[in-house]
Image (cartoon, rainbow, N blue to C red):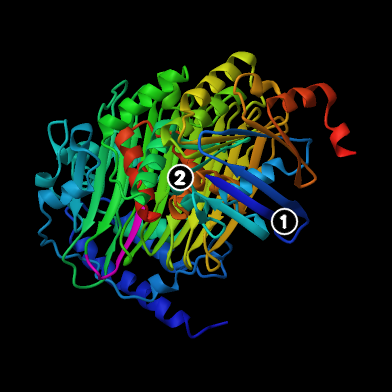
Amino acid sequence: MLNIKNLHAKIEDGAEILKGINLEIKPGEVHAIMGPNGAGKSTLSSVIAGKEDYEVTDGEIIFRGEDIIEDAPEERAHKGIFLSFQYPVEIPGVSVTNFIKAAMNENRKANGLGEMPAKEMLALIREKSEQLGIKKDFLSRSLNEGFSGGEKKRNEIFQMMMLNPKLAILDETDSGLDIDALRIVADGVNAFKNEGNAVLLITHYQRLLNYIQPDFVHVLANGKIIKTGDKSLALELEEKGYDWLLN
Amino acid sequence: MVQTTDIPVMALKEQIIENHNEFLESLRHRFLDGDRKAALQRFENIGFPTKKDEEYKYTNLKEITEKGYNFFPKENHNITKEQLDQLHLGEEHFDWITFVNGKLHKELSKVSIENVEFLSFNYALNDEKHKDVFEKYFNTIAGDKSAFTNLNQAYCKYGFFLKVPKNVVIEKPIHIFYISQNQEENTFYNTRNLLIVEEGAKVEIIESHHNFDSTYVLTNSVTEIFTYPNAKADWHKLQNDNDTSYLIDNTFAKQEKDSLTTVNTFSFGGKLVRNNLDFIQNGSNINSFMNGITIIGKDQLVDHHTAVHHNQPNCESYQNYKGIFDGKSHGVFNGKVFVDKIAQKTNAYQQNNNVLLSEGATIDTKPQLEIFADDVKCSHGCTVGQLNEDALFYLRARGISKKEAQALLLYAFANDAMQNIDIEPLKEKISKLLAEKLEVDIEF
């Protein structure tokens, strides 16, 4: 699904942040990347999604057999990469419904499909929003405007479920969530998950991993993956912190 | 110092002076002749503003004043109901009154009241019963200082007239269409609107100008709005005319205590548009709203000059102007707020935010506050910027193309200047025009 080889990236005209990342994600797998602040976790997710503030200086990102480094963010989305943002942007005046409709149809168009019939779209919106406990009036509100932290994250997961990507990268989706919201978000991710897709969780804490079971846990520090293990590694990190790995 | 460029400017000025007698001869009513001649004299003395004039420093009128115009538009037209339908915002929700080539056309109008002529400025001018109304209101706030208002006073004849009686709520917004068609020569219109909203009454107006020809239309419009206690008047200007249109809009609103008046200006089209908007607060507890959205490109120019006169205590004014400029377009915003020394507890808010989409686009923005009271809340701010890159990335990461992502963000940027519109079809129309101007096919 995703094969990252020796990935180096820096901020445009700035310091190198990713210093040789190697990561392979196969269909049906859930990976978690953990690490201390400033390790490069969010940079890695931004670089996979194609943020233009970063320059890839070396290495490859192969997604479903294609090198995507030259692709624009929207092209990567069309190919099936989804990034749930740590800080979703507020768009006043554009409703959640209209936004998701626009995004859905853009993706369909890019994949040679026509616009989804309005009826079908509404039924899908209803199904997914109900699954996440999203109320009807929420859908007519302006995108992310005045949303609480939990509402923003729930909205990200709603968009993920609607767009049904091949690879979902969840960047700090657990931050700012209370325990109930966390459970709903995790239920959403678990419902989304199947043998044909994959999930990459980026998180600072182990908490989320109680609800979404990862197959692999990687520790990212100083721009490199310094340790890989199974879910027990997350518990070990919770107990001991990161220092024992850094020395 | 005499410059050679002054000569052609004199030319239009001379046309104006020369044509006046012929214009007066064409009128049925003559009771205003004296006032009209005096106004023409004042215009002659003042002359068209040039770039040396502080108020026109950024807006060069030369391209307007160097052209020749026909002062007496040909009446013949072939505007059909279908063509008018294209301009409508949705028939069932509105009444409308249509002027073609300066003349009211009943067959292209529809109003819920008995006789559409009651909404004609010209009809009111010629109706003895309205003489006292004219004496009381006409030109009392437009004043005698500006070249354009004097010019309009000298030449005005056609336009919209409405006096909403006490406690009458006009349910359907009234859309005024000013259409110019089949004019082989450049044409000059001096439209005139007079709206009086008596105590407790309510009305909403939409005004739009449409030039169907490739010859130039110069419209010098004067609107006077009077709002009485507990009355509410909303006037929406939809400025989306073609590339051979010039509009000088002079709007004056005078409010009595406890009244609410809104003037919204949506500027998408026209070659050169100058909006002079004056609010005079003449009582306490007044609310005045001024919103604007400007989206232009090519070599268009839109200039907003606003002035709010806070003359009494406990009043509020809100100005929110958004501008999006592409191509080699040029935007101007100058917002004046005057707070008299007795106008304590004034709350005046002014905001002008702009996005430049190209290197060739420019904006000149200047807030101007003159405050003589000490217990007031006045805020102002202006920004000029580009789109937020993080926000663009967010949208693109959802599969939305760069162009459409930009359009969504610009829509979001302009959106809060639409908050005061309570006519849903108008909001939809503006959203559609925004998408059109930004060349995207999305429903916001």
Q: Secondary structure at mark 2?
A: helix
Hey, which residue is sitting farthest right in the picture?
A: A247
- Image quadrant in which the C terminus of chain A is located: top right
Q: Classify 10 Å Cα crowding around label 1: few (below 14), some (14-19), many (20 and above).
A: some
In the image, is A27 to the left or to the right of B198? right
Q: Is residue B205 left or right of residue B370?
A: left
- Tell me which secondary structure the magenta stretch mostly adopts: strand
- Region in magenta: B213-222
Query: In x, y percent, where is residue A111?
Result: 36, 49
| Frontmost residue, B376 versus B327 | B327
Q: Residue B367 or A74: which is nearer the viewer?
A: A74
Tell me where residue B226 sits by quadrant.
top left
User: Can residue A206 be seen by looking at this rendering?
Assistant: yes
Q: Is residue A80 magenta?
A: no
Mark in front: 2 vs 1: 1
Left or right: B202, with B31 as reference point: right
Report helix, strand or loop for mark 1: strand
Corner quadrant of residue A233? top right
Q: Amino acid at mark 2?
A: Tyr
- Residue A130 image position (x, y, % from top left): 41, 18
Q: Is residue B444 visible?
A: no
Residue bearing the label numbered 1:
A10
The residue nearer to you, when weighing B44 against A164, is A164
The reply to whether label 2 and label 1 mark residues of one chain is no
For residue B411, the mark is 2
How packed mark 2 is, by other alpha carbons closer than 10 Å (few <14, some 14-19, many 20 or more), is many
Residue drawn at (59%, 48%), measured in percent from left and top?
A3
